[in-house]
Image (cartoon, grey):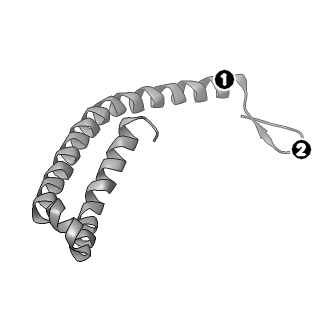
Amino acid sequence: MTTHPEGRKALTDKDLADLTQRLAETAIERNCRCEGAEAENERLRLLLTECAEDIRSYVDHEYPEASRAQYPSIERRWIRDMELVWRVRAAVETKGTGDE
């Protein structure tokens, strides 16, 4: 770095070249880590989807549609228990479409 007459520091061409090189190396390192993370994220996304489907199946079995239609209290319990399923699905769909 060089110093201006006013006492401020300025980057020289060499400083900029060094900084650019370090940023490029960092980007390459992060990209390598991201590729491994993408595979792990996809694996976790599939597991979450499977768990949500299992919960949905259990909740639907616990509170059958005929009972939900007949009794508002059972409908409220079904909605309460399904909220987790809906949140997981929304999170998985959002991450899966690249809207991060």
State which quadrant residue 75 falls in. bottom left
Residue 14 badge: 1
Q: Position of residue 10 (x, y in %)?
A: 77, 35
What residue sits 22% from the left and 45% below the top?
49
Task: Find numbered disc 2 in the image and state the secondary structure of the residue it sits on.
Answer: loop
What residue sits 24% from the left and 37% below the top?
40
Query: What distance separates the C-alpha of mark 2 from that of mark 1?
Result: 21 Å
What residue sits 20% from the left and 70% below the top?
70
Q: Position of residue 73 (x, y in %)?
A: 24, 76
Side (left or right) of 95 relative to 13: left
What residue sits 73% from the left and 27% below the top?
12
Q: Position of residue 34 (x, y in %)?
A: 36, 33
State which quadrant residue 42 falls in. top left
- Provide the residue designation for mark 2: 6
Name the residue at the right extreme.
5
Q: Position of residue 18 (x, y in %)?
A: 59, 26
User: Relative to residue 19, is residue 43 depicted above or below?
Assistant: below
Task: Find numbered disc 1 in the image and state the secondary structure of the residue it sits on.
Answer: helix
Side (left or right) of 3 relative to 23: right
Q: Mark 1 or mark 2, which is nearer the start of the sequence?
A: 2
State which quarter of the image contains the C terminus: top left
Circles 2 and 1: CB atoms closer than 8 Å: no
| Residues packed near mark 1 inside 10 Å, few (<14), some (14 to 19) or many (20 plus) | few
Q: Amino acid at mark 1?
A: Lys
Name the residue at the bottom extreme.
73
State which quadrant residue 16 falls in. top right
Side (left or right) of 90 relative to 72: right
